[in-house]
Image (cartoon, grey):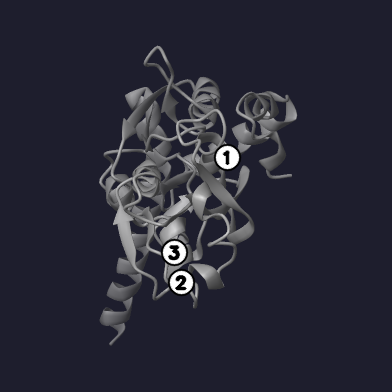
């Protein structure tokens, strides 16, 4: 029995040391590579291509500012949002930095940085349906779309009234807008940050609108790192510096997000 207990204690200590080594190695791994590989999807104003074909956006510039202080280069890779956790664990990417909503479920699979932006899930419809769809009750039988594995999808499925409405998952939030615009869906549940940038007068979706006053989920954005990653604390220190020196506020102002920064 004593031999068994001694062996058990030794195994526990060994696994503890392995866990600590994994945590310590993650930051060194990124520094050794000289780059931070960032998993994103494309949507304005977070990460998108400008008229010159250059990647830009709030999260893009935020990441560049953090990487400059880390002393590494940012490498942005477009990923399938549905498999983001798999990509992160497999080290195909080093973090998820693209309007990532903090949830208790996700905390089981990844570490989060300090939250930096407030967001909410809103409902986008065609302007011609403004009188038809005004609240959750009126949307009970509407055909919904949202990005797969997104907060928008969760908002639909967790809502007692909307849970039984016809629903189709899209690969991207922008695909959801296309469906509503083409009249193949009645409503899309999207990030407020995206909706305010891409819907309404002066946009490519001038015939679409956000239902005023209807907020399905209030949430916060943060950066997702591998579970137990030592880089999380380092990035949090840098975020604090960028807040203190006004850099983050300036980036937010540039993309119309100043009012959504976490205080």
Q: Tell me which numbered mark, 3 or 1, is placed earlier along the sequence.
A: 3
Residue 74, visible in the rendered structure: yes
Q: Secondary structure at mark 3?
A: helix
User: Circle 3 is placed at which residue position?
Assistant: 154
Q: Tell me which numbered mark, 1 or 2, is placed earlier along the sequence.
A: 2
Tell me, yes or no, whether the two marked residues, 1 and 2, touch with CB atoms within 8 Å. Answer: no
Tell me, yes or no, whether the two marked residues, 3 and 2, touch with CB atoms within 8 Å. Answer: no
Task: Look at the picture and state if 29 lies above or below 245.
Answer: below
Mark number, residue 10: none
User: Circle 1 is placed at which residue position?
Assistant: 196
Q: Is residue 1 left or right of residue 110?
A: left
Residue at image position (64%, 35%) is 257
Crowding near pointer 2: few (<14 within 10 Å), some, many (20+)?
many
Q: Nearer the viewer, residue 158 or 95?
A: 158
Q: Nearer the viewer, mark 3 or mark 2?
A: 2
x, y (%) of residue 222?
A: 54, 46
x, y (%) of residue 87?
A: 28, 45
Q: Secondary structure at mark 2?
A: loop
Residue at image position (28%, 51%) is 83
Task: Look at the picture and state if 132 lies above or below 20.
Answer: below
User: Circle 2 is placed at which residue position?
Assistant: 162
Q: Nearer the viewer, residue 73 or 253?
A: 253
């Amino acid at each position: 029995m004593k031999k068994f207990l001694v062996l058990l204690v030794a195994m526990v200590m060994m696994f503890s040391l392995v866990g600590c080594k994994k945590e310590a190695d993650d930051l060194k791994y990124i520094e050794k590579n000289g780059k931070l590989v960032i998993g994103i999807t494309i949507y304005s104003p977070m990460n998108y291509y400008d008229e010159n074909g250059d990647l830009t956006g709030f999260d893009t510039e935020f990441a560049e500012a953090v990487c400059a202080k880390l002393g590494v280069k940012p490498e942005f890779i477009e990923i399938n949002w549905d498999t983001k956790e798999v990509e992160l664990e497999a080290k195909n990417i080093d973090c998820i930095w693209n309007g990532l909503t903090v949830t208790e479920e996700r905390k089981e699979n990844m570490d989060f940085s300090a939250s930096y932006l407030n967001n909410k899930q809103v409902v986008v419809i065609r302007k011609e349906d403004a009188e038809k769809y005004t609240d959750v009750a009126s949307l009970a039988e509407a055909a919904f779309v949202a990005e797969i594995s997104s907060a928008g999808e969760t908002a639909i499925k967790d809502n007692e009234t909307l849970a039984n409405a016809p629903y189709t998952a899209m690969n991207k939030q922008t695909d959801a807008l296309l469906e509503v615009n083409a009249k193949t869906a009645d409503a899309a549940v999207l990030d407020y940050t995206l909706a305010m940038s891409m819907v309404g007068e002066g946009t490519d979706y001038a015939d679409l609108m956000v239902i005023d006053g209807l907020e399905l989920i209030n949430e916060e954005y943060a950066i997702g790192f591998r579970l137990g990653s030592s880089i999380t604390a380092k990035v949090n220190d840098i975020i604090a510096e960028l807040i203190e020196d006004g850099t983050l506020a300036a980036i937010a102002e540039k993309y119309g997000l100043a009012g959504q920064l976490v205080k």
